[in-house]
Amino acid sequence: MIAKDTSYNAKNLRKMYDTWYANALKTKVYPQYADFKKNLESEKDKLPQGSAYEKLKEMIGLEKVKQVIEQAVTYSKMQKLLADRGMPNARRAMHMVFTGNPGTAKTTVARLFAQILKDNEVLSVGDLIECGRSDLVGRFVGWTAVQVKEMFKKAKGSVLFIDEAYSLVDEKNGSFGDEAINTIVQEMENCREDMVVIFAGYPKKMNEFISRNPGLRSRISFYVDFDNYSPDELFDITKLIAKNNGFKLADDAYETLAPIFENAFGTEDFGNGRFARNLVEQAQLAQSVRLSTLDFDSLSGDDLVTLCAQDFSKINTGIRLEENRKQRIGFSKVV
């Protein structure tokens, strides 16, 4: 396969070797597997393509997030096509920053994004590898760089999701946290061809983290802001969570839940989807207590799976209504 008096780059040689190796295996070493690849491709065509992207589009809210993810996937596919055609420096890093309050689905979107990149043949593995400070910062001198490199090696071909990335920032310069950030920056560049790093955290703290290392900001291609859910979106999320738990909401539940969601916006570190999940779980407990006082034999199957306004009305949300209303700015009542 190698022509005389012809030069080849490493990429072309690797492709030629892989082709030769596969053919040799099928024709000389294991000829009984000659039709294996053909059958594999036939089965692959039957599998659903892009299911993760469909799940992302079906998620409640997150319209800005969906738009950025769609742009990133389209961009990465084009860059891969250009790189495969041998265009120099065509492939650009896909590293991202996710900023948002708790419960805004940052981890869920990152997991779907990894699968989307795999479905579109941008990443080879497509897993989500989650880590934090304890996974990256060593206890002794010389350990941190090794731990960071091992984590990047583990995430090869996938998405490395560094949650609460600002926890790497220490008060003193030159500490283990700075060593971790410096090594991360180096590995981000070394692994840019088949890996995506996503830094995630609360909006106010992420800017300090990004500014810690001069080379970090230049290696971030996309900044994705996860806004708080609106009261209507939170109600839809509550219905979905209840449905996934085997329950449904009564028609009168909205009137009780709407002011709860509206009032929650003024609180610090509002839980968003987590807040909605907590409401459903508490309502299920309240429903159990309510049903226990009734004649069980007279209850229908619908009664057993319905959460009504009464089940939500006695929930302790931890929010003091009067004080919160004084602090809130720019939110009106839901009608």
Image: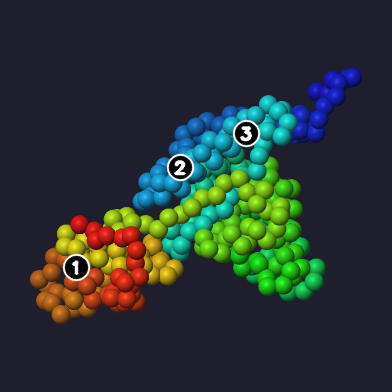
Near-viewer residue (261 or 127): 261
Q: Residues within 10 Å of mark 1 (few under 14, many from 20)?
A: some
Identify the mark at residue 309; answer none if there is no mark: 1
Which is more N-terminal, label 1 or label 2?
2
Q: Are marks 3 and 2 in contact (CB under 8 Å)?
A: no
The secondary structure type at the circle numbered 1 is helix
Q: Position of residue 239 (x, y in %)?
A: 28, 58
Near-viewer residue (243 or 215): 215
Distance from Cα at disc 2 to Cα at disc 1: 36 Å
- From the viewer's perspective, tell me whether residue 143 is left or right of residue 74: right
State whether residue 314 appears in this view.
yes
Q: Which residue is mark 3?
A: 79
Q: Is residue 140 above or below residue 136?
A: below
Residue 148 figure quarter: bottom right
Q: Position of residue 257 (x, y in %)?
A: 25, 65
Distance from Cα at disc 3 to Cα at disc 2: 18 Å
Q: Which quadrant, please, contains the C terminus?
A: bottom left
The amino acid type of the residue labelled 2 equals: Gln
The secondary structure type at the circle numbered 2 is helix
Which residue occupies 31% across, 72% down? 326
Q: Which residue is mark 2?
A: 67
Which residue occupies 58% across, 50% down? 96
- From the viewer's perspective, tell me whether residue 313 is left or right of residue 17: left
Q: Residues within 10 Å of mark 3 (few under 14, many from 20)?
A: some
The secondary structure type at the circle numbered 3 is helix
